Image (cartoon, grey):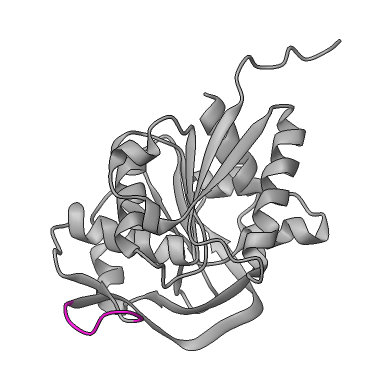
Amino acid sequence: MHHIPPKKTLRIALVGDYNHDVVAHQAIPLAIDDAAAVLEITADYDWLPTSEINSDEDLVGYDAIWVVPGSPYKNANGAFIAIKYARENAVPFLGTCGGFQHAVIEYARNVLGWADAAHAETENIGRMVITPLTCALVDQNGAIELRPNTLIAHAYGRELIEEAYRCSFGVAEEFARELESGDLRVTGWDEDGEIRAVELVTHPFFVATLFQHERAALTGRPVPLVQAMLRAACE
């Protein structure tokens, strides 16, 4: 019995400044193609440089938005516009590494009212929501514990995972406490209890991770969160 193919092709916006030397950028098309093949759908993607995103109009028509690694972005505001658009319009959203950091800042600024929420990599005034990690996680793998009954735990089908990182910045300790009260929930931690994943509970699919799960595609492994994002986009 054959599956009836869906009538439309999914359109995925990859928000970030493409660089063929960035390992995650090599992995992302493979991750999308693999996930689409598993789901038996067609998914096309457009790389949208942050410098070309100036308003919501630039994002209309996409079925999912992925803010990809590679920060500092040429135009951080472009990343923030994409995140806010996905958050407010129930567009399935994935943020990895820099995308995770910017999703946390966007939420701090526009939902929690921390108008001066800032990223320590690029700013020296304001309240630092994203600060240097005690130990940089460059090309390292680490174990992540997932909160049960969350989008991310359902995607992986288990509560302990191991993924690769390439980052030097994470959520500031002072801000971590603020996240306990809102709708952006912490859904993944490392062994030391540091925040490694968040998701928005009021949204059909809004997941951001500090780790670069897309790298799994380079070794031919499935990428559960990309499958979950495409599945959400189909619905």
Question: Can you say whether 92 is above or below 105 in the image?
Answer: above
Quarter of the image with the N terminus is: top right
Going 38% across and 58% down the picture, which residue do you hit? 51
Say left or right for 59 vs 28: left
Does the rendering let one see residue 41? Answer: yes
Q: Position of residue 80 (x, y in %)?
A: 31, 55
Residue nearest the observer in this picture, 200 or 115:
115
Going 38% across and 52% down the picture, which residue do you hit? 52
Q: Position of residue 182 (x, y in %)?
A: 25, 53
Q: Position of residue 132 (x, y in %)?
A: 40, 85
Q: Position of residue 139 (x, y in %)?
A: 65, 79
Q: Residue furthest right?
A: 1
Question: Can you say whether 170 is above or below 5 in the image?
Answer: below
Residue nearest the observer in this picture, 51 or 179:
51
Going 57% across and 49% down the picture, which residue do you hit? 153
Does the rendering let one see residue 157? Answer: no
Q: How many marks?
A: 0
Q: Magenta stretch?
A: 121-126
Say left or right for 214 vs 96: right
